[in-house]
Image (tube, coloured by chain):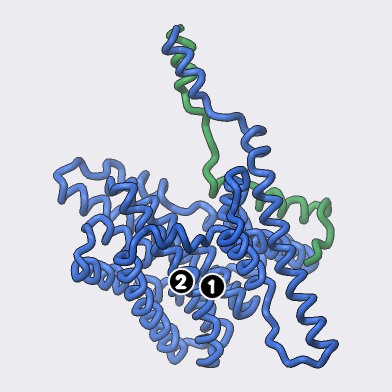
Chain colours: A green, B blue
Amino acid sequence: MAEATTEAKKKPARLSLDGWAVAIALLLAALVRLGVLKHVVW
Amino acid sequence: MASSTVALKAEPIRLPQRVVALLPGVALLIIVGLAGKVLEKTIAGYTKAHHIVFPNIEYVLWAIVVGLLISNTVGVPQWFKPGVATYEFWLKTGIVLLGARFLLADVLKLGSVSLVLVLIELGLSIAFMTLLGRIFKLSPKLTSLLAVGSSICGVSAIIATKGAIDADDEDASFAIAAILALGALALFTFPPIGHWLGMSDRMYGLWAGTGVDNTAEAVAAGALYSDAAAKIAVLAKTTRNAMIGFVVLGYALYWAAREGRQAVGNKAAFLWQKFPKFVLGFLLISLLASLSVFNKDQIGSLANLSRWAFLLTFAGVGLRINFKEMKKQGIRPFIVGALGEVVIAAITLGLVLGASKIVTL
């Protein structure tokens, strides 16, 4: 029981909003570089 | 057993569930943003076809106005709100992607001009807002929050400082409301003033980036002027955002000393914790572009992805503005904020005009 409580209390490592924004932007940049995303229109 | 049940119940919602909860609001951002684009094209096409003289109103303003109309008439239902709040995520993603349009040499050149302007603006804004808070007898912590919000980067800075100086929720919401109301006002005042003064895109972009508080509104105010102005506004605002850790640390130390609390332990860790990491992402993409990792077509694609991200941001800016909620917060913090903003806008305008005499802008 103590283990379950300790386990549940452990905070999972969470990415901050900035971290997510950078990760997604880098992923998009990689997709553009590798040619997966070609000619994004506006 | 009871304790373990409670602890297990308090487990955070899983990522897929959180993503699903965001979908309605993100869909609303897309619809409002696209409505802005469609309105711009339709009205421009109609006025041109019928030879009507009408100023070209950019999608940026339409997206904000459509969002603002929804928010202040039918309102934004609760189940849309988590997704609408993602506009800040789109803003930061857009800024990182925009790094592709800057060569690192440009960033260093313009960034150093921005940095000098930002440092002067920071000192003058904090001093002036503190003085105004004292004159209007606002609580000292509310004054600190307003000073930080108007000198650095609006809502993020207020939230970071609130935790660091142990301010009340009420003071923080007062300061946030004032900063948001004034940011909304800047969207409609900065572009006409810039045009009236005949400012170049670079000069105006620097002014919007140093004079408008909240990042989303600063980028929107730049985009309302021109695409090039938005680019410079992002750079100037990013330089300002990078200062957040130092100012919050200064306030944390001041309030800890004043209240006899233990001051911040590891200052370097504190600075790193408060530093906006998307600035590093922006620099990284800019470095990659400078090293010719992307070809011309790819840089165009990255710039367009950045525009799409900003489109969702502008829709979110409009959807977040709620005049009824702002009215509830009372008039005094708003007056202090408004007086401060007018003076800060004038100071930053003077700084930009002065800098343009020294360096080519």
Can you say whether B352 is above or below B15 in the image?
below
Give the label on residue B356, or none: none
Q: What residue lies at 51% left-to-right and 52% top-to-bottom?
A: B277
Query: Which corner quadrant holds the C terminus of chain A?
Result: bottom right
Residue B308 lies, in percent from the top left, at 70, 61
Q: What residue lies at 15% left-to-right and 51% top-to-bottom?
A: B258
Write down the chain letter for disc 1: B
Camera-side residue: B289 or B166? B166
Circle 1 crowding by C-alpha within 10 Å: few under 14, some 14–19, many from 20: many
Q: In this figure, which residue is indicated by the disc labeled 1?
A: B233
Camera-side residue: B225 or B318? B318
Do we see residue B282 in this rendering? no
Q: How far separated are the C-alphas under marks 2 and 1? A: 9 Å
Camera-side residue: A19 or B162? B162
Q: What residue lies at 47% left-to-right and 54% top-to-bottom?
A: B276
Amino acid under disc 2? Val
Q: In this figure, which residue is indicated by the disc labeled 2?
A: B212
Asked if the residue under mark 1 is in contact with the one under mark 2, i.e. CB atoms within 8 Å, the reply is yes
Can you tell which quarter of the image residue B70 is in? bottom right
Q: Are marks 2 and 1 on the same chain?
A: yes
Left or right relative to B202: residue B210:
left
Residue B16 lies, in percent from the top left, at 67, 33
> Is disc 1 placed on a helix, strand or loop?
helix
Residue B173 lies, in percent from the top left, at 38, 53
Left or right relative to B201: residue B292:
right
> Is disc 2 placed on a helix, strand or loop?
loop
Can you tell which quarter of the image residue A40 is in? bottom right
Q: What residue lies at 70% left-to-right and 83% top-to-bottom?
A: B56
Residue B140 lies, in percent from the top left, at 21, 58
